[in-house]
Amino acid sequence: MVLLQKFCAHIEALPHDIMEADENHPLAAFAGDPVGCIGENEDAWEKFDRPLNGLLQKPPNELQQLVQVGEKGLIGLCHLLEYLVTCHQVTGYLFEGKLEWLMWAIDEVCVNHIGIGCAISNGFQVPTAHNQTMEPRH
């Protein structure tokens, strides 16, 4: 749950003039009240893993394009993940890599937007072309 709290804190730390996502935003598919969206015999994580992979396993510059606030943007995604964790016992390690990359993108948007990073540091650096894994900062 700490990872999810950190992700939500990144969203809250975004500058107030970051664009709000509309119904055409890629994350809008995850907006709305998630209660009841998972069938009785359905695996909650399996339902959302593939669509999330399609959106969040992208090059870093493309992830920055997802950084928009509002229920149809990052806030809606945060609410969905909170629901999966609290109501369906989805564990954070399942989406850890996805959120670490997205938090990096949020930090980069802050740097590009206001010249400084967001208030929260995710402790990782973006991979280079030579090293496609994330490593902790030293």
Image: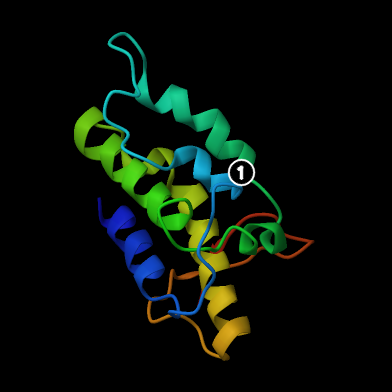
**Residue at the spot 53% in from the left edge and 46% down from the top edge:** 27
Q: Nearer the viewer, residue 39 or 28?
A: 28
Residue 96 lies, in percent from the top left, at 43, 48
**Residue at the spot 46% in from the left edge and 30% down from the top edge:** 48
Find the residue positioned furthest to the bottom. Answer: 115
Residue 46, placed above or below residue 7: above
- Pointer 1 local density, CA inside 10 Å: few below 14, some 14–19, many at least 20: some
Residue 75's image quarter? bottom left
Residue 85, placed above or below residue 36: below
Find the residue positioned furthest to the right. Answer: 129
Residue 89 lies, in percent from the top left, at 24, 31
Q: Is residue 113 shown left or right of residue 123?
A: right
Q: Is residue 61 shown left or right of residue 1?
A: right
Residue 104 lies, in percent from the top left, at 54, 66
Number of marks drawn: 1
Find the residue positioned furthest to the top. Answer: 41
Q: Which residue is label 1 attached to?
A: 55
Q: Is residue 72 shown left or right of residue 65?
A: left
Residue 64, placed above or below residue 76: below
Colouring mode (rainbow / by chain / secondary structure / one colour): rainbow
**Residue at the spot 35% in from the left edge and 43% down from the top edge:** 81
Q: Is residue 47 shown left or right of residue 88?
A: right
Residue 125 lies, in percent from the top left, at 57, 69
Tag 1's secondary structure?
helix
Residue 88's image quarter? top left
Q: Is residue 56 visible?
A: no
Residue type at mark 1 is: Leu
**Residue at the spot 59% in from the left edge and 83% down from the top edge:** 113
Q: Is residue 35 visible?
A: yes
Find the residue positioned furthest to the left. Answer: 86
